[in-house]
Image (cartoon, grey):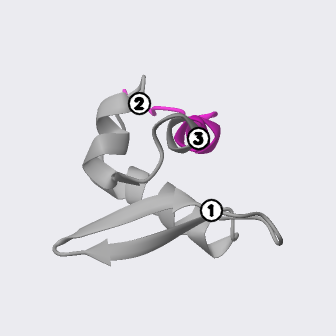
């Protein structure tokens, strides 16, 4: 028997974490999630959100920091 985990609201949950906590690394986001996806799934969601222009990322040493992208005209 094969079991599949469904992550219906993972993207939304990531956005809520970034709104609440501000810039976070992948491991910090992973700790805050209710359902713990494996690393590949989480990275896929983060990469997709970056590609869609919803969030942005910045390298910080070995880690990558993710944060909400500012809307035009909005001050940081």
Residue at (41% x, 30% y) in the render: 33
Q: Secondary structure at mark 1?
A: loop
User: Where is mark 2, residue-wise?
Assistant: 33
User: Where is mark 1, residue-wise?
Assistant: 76
Q: Nearer the viewer, residue 30 or 62?
A: 62
- Quadrant where the C terminus sits is bottom right
Residue at (71% x, 64% y) in the render: 75
Q: Secondary structure at mark 3?
A: helix
Q: Is residue 29 left or right of residue 16?
A: left
* Distance between mark 1 and mark 2 Cα atoms: 25 Å
* Distance between mark 2 and mark 3 Cα atoms: 14 Å
Tell me which numbered mark, 3 or 1, is placed earlier along the sequence.
3
Q: Nearer the viewer, residue 66 or 5?
A: 66
**Residue 16 point in image, percent of width and height:** 59, 35
Q: Inspect the magenta stretch and tell me whether residue 73 lies in it.
A: no
Q: Which residues are magenta?
A: 1-16
Quarter of the image where one finds residue 9: top right
């Amino acid at each position: 028997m094969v079991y599949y985990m469904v992550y219906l609201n993972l993207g939304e949950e990531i956005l809520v974490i970034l709104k609440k906590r501000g810039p976070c690394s992948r491991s910090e986001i992973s700790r805050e999630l209710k359902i713990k996806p494996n690393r590949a799934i989480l990275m896929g969601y983060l990469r997709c959100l970056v590609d869609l222009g919803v969030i942005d990322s910045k390298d910080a040493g070995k880690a990558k920091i993710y944060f909400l992208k500012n809307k035009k005209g909005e001050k940081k």
